[in-house]
């Protein structure tokens, strides 16, 4: 089992910044990747950014160049630095992780990010 706990959400004005944190605990030895997903009201959950076990990263086109995903040296915590926030970034953000032993998807509880003037 892997437990994911998110923190760092909140409300910010357009153009502002936030940093989300996701701490993983439990059986993290077989993590394949960890990532962030957003879900706006009435829409499906979609990938925002992920970081693989080898350190490679992938971003959604909508956040490329504005946001950065990173992790700590222990590889059990990831961060999402969100710069130049736009109202359309408003959503609940979920931390997700995938393990190989056994093959399992895990989700955090979600955290609200609201961008509004």
Image (cartoon, grey):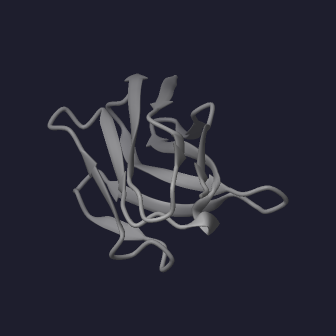
- 21 or 96: nearer the eye? 21
**Most extreme residue toward the front, as rendered?**
117
Residue 27 visible in image: no
Residue 109 visible in image: yes
**Most extreme residue toward the left, as rendered?**
73
Residue 47 is drawn in which quadrant? bottom right
15 w.r.t. 27: above or below: below
The residue located at (31%, 34%) in the rendering is 77
**Most extreme residue toward the top, as rendered?**
26
Q: Quadrant of the C terminus?
A: bottom right
The residue located at (76%, 61%) in the rendering is 44
Give the x, y percent position of residue 84. Answer: 40, 67
Residue 28 is drawn in which quadrant? top left
Give the x, y percent position of residue 34. Answer: 41, 47
Give the x, y percent position of residue 115. Answer: 58, 56
- 84 or 73: nearer the eye? 84
Q: Is residue 41 left or right of residue 59?
A: right
The residue located at (69%, 57%) in the rendering is 45
**Most extreme residue toward the bottom, as rendered?**
61
- 1 or 45: nearer the eye? 45
How many tags in the picture? Answer: 0
The residue located at (34%, 56%) in the rendering is 51
Q: Is residue 54 left or right of residue 38?
A: left
Give the x, y percent position of residue 68. Answer: 31, 60
101 w.r.t. 54: above or below: above
102 w.r.t. 61: above or below: above
């Amino acid at each position: 089992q892997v437990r994911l706990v998110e923190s760092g959400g909140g409300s910010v004005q357009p153009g502002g910044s936030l940093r989300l944190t996701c701490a993983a605990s439990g059986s993290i030895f077989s993590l394949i990747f960890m990532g962030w997903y957003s879900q706006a009201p009435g829409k499906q959950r979609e990938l925002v950014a992920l970081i693989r076990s080898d350190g490679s990263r992938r971003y959604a086109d909508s956040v490329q160049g504005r946001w950065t995903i990173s992790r700590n040296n222990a590889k059990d915590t990831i961060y999402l630095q969100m710069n130049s926030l736009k109202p359309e970034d408003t959503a609940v953000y979920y931390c997700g992780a995938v393990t190989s032993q056994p093959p399992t998807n895990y989700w955090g509880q979600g955290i609200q990010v609201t961008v509004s003037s």
